[in-house]
Amino acid sequence: MTTTNPPATRTPATYPSGSPERLLGRDHPRWGWWVAWWRADRGSVAAEVTIAAPFLVMLLVFVGVVIHRGVDARLRIEDAAHQAARAASIERTSATATAVARSTATSALSSAGVTCVSLTVDAATGGMRPGGTVSVTVSCTVDFGDALILGVPGEKRLSATAVEPIDTWRSASGTASGGST
């Protein structure tokens, strides 16, 4: 008489370490519900993407707006520096050139809609000699306080420098006709 051996049964302790059962966590009692939930949740990726897509689009738009504000402020400050340097190069004295550069930069930034927390305008006139140059540096601290959600710093210091030549043929005396005094 021959007897057959009963089939071998495996216990969780006898699973090889690289078996799929071990990778899925079937031998760990707490992970059983997770594996069952994960397998029963097939086909829900489309629903999850549909729910998450509007939030991702809003985040992308918000990042675009913040980047646009920074680039726009930088362009406006560069334009204000050029306007201030041109206005200063037309003046006859260093004191009036510096004053005109400040007022021109302030009015150019306010008309462009750039609000500076602090504005600094430095004018280097070089004695206002014919054939010389006037250099104007405009520094503005721009407030990005409403963009703190993305980790953008609350304030950013932007600056621009412009150099304009002083007309070689202008008279230093200040007469309109160009004649001697």
Image (cartoon, rainbow, N blue to C red):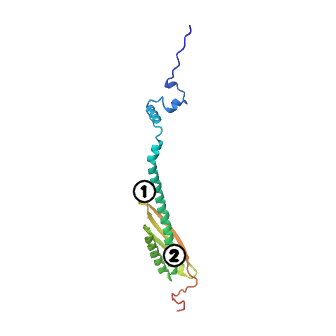
Q: Looking at the picture, does residue 93 appear above or below residue 138?
A: below
Query: Which residue is nearer to you in this view: 83 or 89?
Result: 83
Tell me the SS state at disc 1. Answer: helix
Mark 1 crowd level (few <14, some 14–19, many ≥20, 10 Å Cα)? few
Residue shown at the point (44%, 64%) measured from the top left: 142
Q: Residue 176, position in %: x, y?
A: 51, 88
Circle 1: residue type: Leu
Q: Is residue 69 above or below residue 17?
A: below
| Residue 93: numbered disc | none
**Image vertical order of residue 171 relative to residue 55, above or below:** below
Residue type at mark 2 is Ala
For the residues labelled 1 and 2, the Cα–Cα distance comes to 34 Å
Which residue is pictured at 49% across the width and 25% down the height? 12
Residue 85 image label: 2
Residue 163 in the image, given as x and y percentages of width and height: 55, 74
For the point 47% across and 34% down, which residue is it? 39
**Disc 1 target residue:** 148
